[in-house]
Every structure is written in structure tokens, then in C-alpha cells.
Image (cartoon, rainbow, N blue to C red):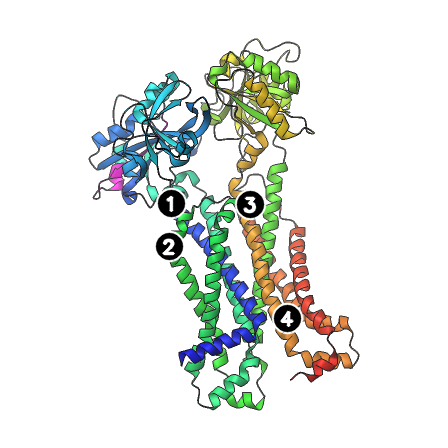
Amino acid sequence: MLSNYLKIALRQLWRNRLFSVLNLVGLTVGLAVSTFIALYVWHEFHYDRFHPFAERTYRIMCMSKFGGEEVFFPGLHESFGRLAKQQIPEIDEFVRWSDGTDVVLQSDVNHQFKEENIGFADASILTVMGFDLLYGNKKTALTTPGQIVLTRPLAEKYFGLQNPVGKTLLFDKHFPLTVSGVMKDLPTNSVIQFNALVSLPSMPTLGPKHRELFKQYGMFTTYLVLRPDANVSTVTRKLKRVTGGFQFGDLKAEYLLESMPSLHLYSRTDQKGEARQSLYILLTIALVILALAIINYISMTTARATKRAREVGIRKAIGGQRRELIFQFFLESFLTTTLAFATSLLVLQGIFSWANEALDLHMDNRVLGQGPYWGVMLVLWLGCSLLAGAYPALLLSGFRPALILKGTLTMRYSGANLRRTFTTVQFTASIGLLICSLVLFAQMRFLRTRSIGIDRAQVVSMHIDGDMQAQLPALRDAIRGWAGPANVATTNTRLFTSNVSTWFVETKKTKKQLMVNALTVDKSFFDMMGIRWLYRPDDWAARPVTSDLTVYNQTAIREAGITGNPLQQPAPFKYDSVVAGVIADFHVHSLHGPVSAMRLTVVSDTNRSIMANGGYVLVRLNPNTNVGQAVDQLKAIYDRQQPTAPFDYYFLDDAYNQLYAREDRLARLFNAFTGLTLLVACLGLLGLMTFNVEARTKEIGIRKVLGASVASIVALLSKDFMKLVLLAIVIASPIAWYAMNQWLQQFTYKIDIRWWMFVLAGGLAALVAVLTISFQSIKAALMNPVKSLRTD
């Protein structure tokens, strides 16, 4: 019996090849895309759950109120975790970790590179966090000074494929470290990411800079592993009473505990929940695409109901039971979804790495071998089979044989109204996503092109190592001779990154607490970067800077409550210098928030003030220059000065664009999935149009015999579908407006949603629909009426 049902199902699939292919492609796209998004969302929601003690591991977060706002700091002094462990019995273990700074590593004269994310950590990080080693002993790898554990890519970069344990790496050009281990690849779904770990006891031995950071500053993220019976609230209260010889910052600060699995998406540092919002949007898109694929299958299956009505009538007349027919139609659905499932698996495996890179996602291939991946695929497969097969099976098996065999089957049995609803839903989703994509595009374009008060175009920022103070004058003169004196400036700040210094100050006049960004620059910085003066310092153009000057932006002056000429008034902040000049506001952060108050120190001796801890030479390139050749020439100038560190640079434009990486990723995802949604909708429309033409073949032939033109027949076949598309535009527009208006609220600076976005999205959808419909409608209108009237 089962073999007969299977033969009938295969015969139906082969006999109706066009509809079978359309169904297969639609379901394959829906399954592949939905699974990919579901995997990404699962990956993001399951950060740091792989750690052995994840459920009882907590990060200490320091919270203080400043200027009426809550400010959160994860960085603590190195002694805090150690003293907390001694004074709070509920603490089982602690881990101190710092992602560190960029540093130069060297294994030999041919292998010297500047590396990012070289961190410092306790030996307990390897066991507590469950990080495994390819080489070395995790219990001893970070216990003593002078040890470093490398990640596999970094080990291969410096030592090839050999076991590097016991070999030496030079840290920061002066300090030898022994490689004590090589780590397996870190999971991508962890907030703890690094390229290498230096043992924490090594830090005080790595020169005055690191010794001062270790002893005087709060730079360590501290994790506590609590005992299984510990009460989190009790431990949180006890943290306030931790005492020792070191003053732990602001005594009014509160300590909070954040569970390890919550850090990625639920940390207090992301109070707006922007990361979660993006994931919910993507999950909604996944469900929409999958629903559209299932709708396609149901629409095209029910559209061919009248073609199979006679089969159903005869089988019922000779004794066939309804449950047997339901099983038959479910089997056909099962076959189609199984083929689509298998195809989507192949597609997903094939495009996984490419899609990850193209969409700038951070998943590794290990997620494809994990149980949840196969669980998601199984649920989608079974769900699609049931959802896609249920309605057609119940509809087709419910035909009354008497009506069928008399030829009096009415349209209410064919599901025509349901198909119209489905088509409207499909294009509502497609048009809604098109509108959202246009708003995203317009907002991203606005963010990239809006004037931010500083000219960042074609500016290269070259990092100059702190050990190159002696070479800086000659290097800067050489660069000025190459680029022109007006196109070179220096600063101590890596602009458009998170490394901009922030001072916590109080205004003298209003007693207002304020966070002020602090930069150190030279005199040429202002003209070279196009920063506008509101009040120039006295004799600014007439003579060089002979002593340090303090310049504020207009936001700092306004927040300090200063009116009139600020150059003739006392210093705006306690313990600060008088105002030497005032500049117009410019942004050094993203446009998510308002411009920050800013203090710029203009120095006379750039070697002493800017280069003490390393600085940056800014070079503006000629707009018509070849960028690759210009960078090569800059590198050649740099190398001639016998530098102590490799050539390191970045473009300000690239750094500024990176501030919107999350929005840019969301826009790329929207564009990709909007296109796929429109593809699925058009596949369904093509199938329904093909069926419509088949069902009206004789009608078209009669109309042509009676003199109907090709244009009138095309209009006749198309108008019903176009009405549905127009209805979809009306429904989709307010929904998309509301959704994107809510999304735009996260930006202080944003676009207005314009009417043309709705018109353009609707017009594009209508054009695609017309092109899809025209393929079959024109073909039908050109058909020989004699052949049409001969069809059975």
C-alpha cells in the first residue's frame, strides 16, 4: 500500500514538473535562509554557556552615578578579586583578565609584528573558562612571570606548524617571554576573545608603563565563581565591604554581579538592548521567509485542486477512505519538503563560510556540527511538512464525489479566496522589507555623509611608537616634505575608536558633573582637520605655541554655564586651566548620541607631551592620489627612520564607518533577505499565474476569435494580481513606517522617513510583479486560438 502511495506521489511530482520545481525552490530558499538566521540567533543567545561553571560564574560590574547618569565600569584593581576571595567565603574561585593593548611581538628578525588583543590573565582562566590547549599544561601555563600562551593562528604566524612551547617571544621590543602553551581555536560565542595571554604575574616586570597600570589603575575584568549554595544577593552586598590596603575608586560606587551567559546581550552596558533588538528583527524575517515558502506550497497545491478533483472523486466512488487520501497528500508534501530539506542542507553547508564573511557575522563552522543545528533542521523539516501538507490534504480529501463527477465543483472548494489572501500577505511582507531596506540605506548614507565638524576624508593615521621620540622630528619633516606642511598634524588619540580619554570634572559655576573627552594635539591639527574656531587664542596666527594652551568645544562651554566671551572669564572647571580658545563642536564618537564636551590641549613640545606613550601622525592624502602607492611611499619614509616598531596605520574614514558596524551588518542582512523574500513571492506569483493561464485557456482562445487584442488579454490576466499588489502596498506602508520609526529612535541624529521611500518600494514591487506576470500572460495572449480551443 505504501509503495503505491509513493509511486502516485512521485508520478504527480514528475507530471507537474514546473510546479514541483517552483515548490522545491521556494521551500529550499525558505528552509536554508530560516535555518541560517536561526543558527545565528541561537549562536548569539548562547554566548558563554560552554564554560564548565557558566551558571555560577559572575562578572563584577562597578556602577557609579555621575552627572545624573549611571556609569558602569567592568575594570577593577588587581587586588580586588584576590581580597574578595579571602574575605567572602561564598566565592569558590576568581579570574582576573584584561584584554590588554596592542603590542609588538618578535620571534626573530623576520617575524616582528604589531599584534592586537594581547591580554593578561590569571592561570585560573584556562580551567574556569574551559579553554583547552593544543600544547602545554593548562594548570601551569600562566602561573609564573615570563609566560605567554598563544592562540593557534598566532603560534603558526611566528613559529609555523612546529610545537612552540619553550621558545621565546620578545614582548614590546625589550622583554622576553617563554611560550608555555598553544590554545585551540576559541569559540566565537564568547565575550572573552584574545590573540594571546600573558601571565598576570608578568605584568609588573614588563617596564614602568605596565608596572604602573598594574599597581595604580583599575583595568582588570574580574570574574567570580560562586559556590553552588551561594546567594548572589548576599555576595553582592558583601562586595561593598571588601577592604584592603588599596582605595577602590569612588567609595559611593556600587558593585553588581552579572551572570556569565548574560554578558553578551543583557549586560547593563547595553541598557537600550540594541543587540537584542537586531536579533528579534532577524528572527522575524526568518519566520516571514519560511511562512512565505509554505504559503507558496499551499497556494500552488490548492490552485491545482480542480485538476485533481476527478482523481479524488473516482477514488472515493470506488471506496477510497478520506484518511487514505489525507495520507496520500501528506506523503506528497513530505516528499517535497524532504527534497527541499536535503537541498537546503547542501546549500547551507556550501555558502556558510561565504555568507559569514559577506554579512560580517562571527560564527565558525563548529556550529554546524552541534546538536542545536540538527535540532533546528529537524523541527523545520517536520514543521514545514505538517504546515504545508495540512490544508491541501484536508481541502482535496474533502471534495464530494457527486459534485465532482457531475462537473459542478464550485470555486469555493478550490481555495481561491485563500490564495488571494496568501498572495497579498506575500507581497505585504516583501514591500514592507523593501521599505525597511530603503530607510536603512538612507540612514546609513546620512551617517556617513553628514558633516561631523571634522574633515576625515583621505586622512591616514600613522601610529608612532613611544620609543621613537628621537626619530619623530626627522620623520615628521620628511612627511611634511612629501605631503605638504598643511597636510600633517599630530595627536595622542586614536580618533573614532573607544580609546578616546574621558575626564570626570565638575563645573565651577553650576557645580554640574560632566564627562569631558580629552585630546592632546599640535597647532596644525585644527586647520589640517578643518575644525572651525569660534574664539581663536590670542596671536594664534602670528606666533608659534610656546606653552601649552587649553581649548574647549562649544558644548563644554555651554555646559559650564559660561556666557559672553569665554576667553575673558575664569576657568570653567575645577582644577583646570583658563580658556585659551573655543572651537565649534565636532564628533569623535558615533552619531548614536549627542556631541560630547571636549577639552583639547595644544602643546608646544610634541615629543614630550604626545609621544610619551606613543602618538599618531595624521597625513591628508591628495584626493587624486593612488591610495595604495601613497601608503607604500609613507611606509618607505617611515622605514628610513630606523623605526622600533612595524609600520602601523589606519584611515579615519574606515574607523568612523566601523562605529556603525552593527547597523551596517543589519542593512546587509536586510538587503539579502529582502531580495530572497521577493524571490519567494515571485515564484508563488509565477506558479499561480501559470495555473490561471491553464485554467482559462479556452476562454482566452474564444476572446481571441472574437477579436480581443493581445494587450487586452494581458490586462485581463494581470489586473486581479495587480490589485492584490496595490492592496499589499497599502497594508505594508504603515507597518513598515512604525517599525523603522522605532528603530531610528536609537540615533540622536537621524533622517525623516520620506514619502518617496514608500513610492519607490511599492513601484519596485509592482514592477517585479508585472515582469513575473507578463512572462505567462503574454505567452498566453500570443497562443494560437485554434490550439487553445482544442484543449481538453
Density class for disc 3 (Cα within 10 Å; few <14, some 14-19, many ≥20) is: some
Is 737 rendered above or below residue 786? above
Q: Which mark is residue 677?
A: none
In this figure, which residue is indicated by the disc labeled 2?
372
Residue 303 percent coordinates (x, y): 57, 75
- What is the three-letter code of the residue carrying label 4? Met
Residue 523 percent coordinates (x, y): 60, 16
Q: Which mark is residue 47?
A: 1
In this figure, which residue is indicated by the disc labeled 3?
744
Is 774 rendered above or below residue 44? below
Residue 645 percent coordinates (x, y): 48, 21
- Work out whether mark 1 precedes mark 2 in sequence or the reverse, and give the earlier one: 1
Density class for disc 2 (Cα within 10 Å; few <14, some 14-19, many ≥20) is: some
In this figure, which residue is indicated by the disc labeled 4?
689
Q: Secondary structure at mark 1?
A: loop
Q: Secondary structure at mark 3?
A: helix
Q: Secondary structure at mark 4?
A: helix
- What is the three-letter code of the residue carrying label 1? Tyr
- Work out whether mark 4 precedes mark 1 in sequence or the reverse, and give the earlier one: 1
Is 334 rendered above or below residue 186? below
- What is the three-letter code of the residue carrying label 2? Pro
Q: Is residue 262 visible?
A: yes
Density class for disc 1 (Cα within 10 Å; few <14, some 14-19, many ≥20) is: many
Q: What's the magenta region?
A: 217-236
Instruction: Tell me how far mark 3 sits from mark 1, CA to CA.
Output: 27 Å
Instruction: Tell me how far mark 4 sits from mark 1, CA to CA.
Output: 46 Å
**Quadrant assignment, res 687:** bottom right
Residue 734 percent coordinates (x, y): 59, 56
- Work out whether mark 4 precedes mark 3 in sequence or the reverse, and give the earlier one: 4
- What is the three-letter code of the residue carrying label 3? Leu
Q: Is residue 224 found inside the magenta-colored segment of the image?
A: yes
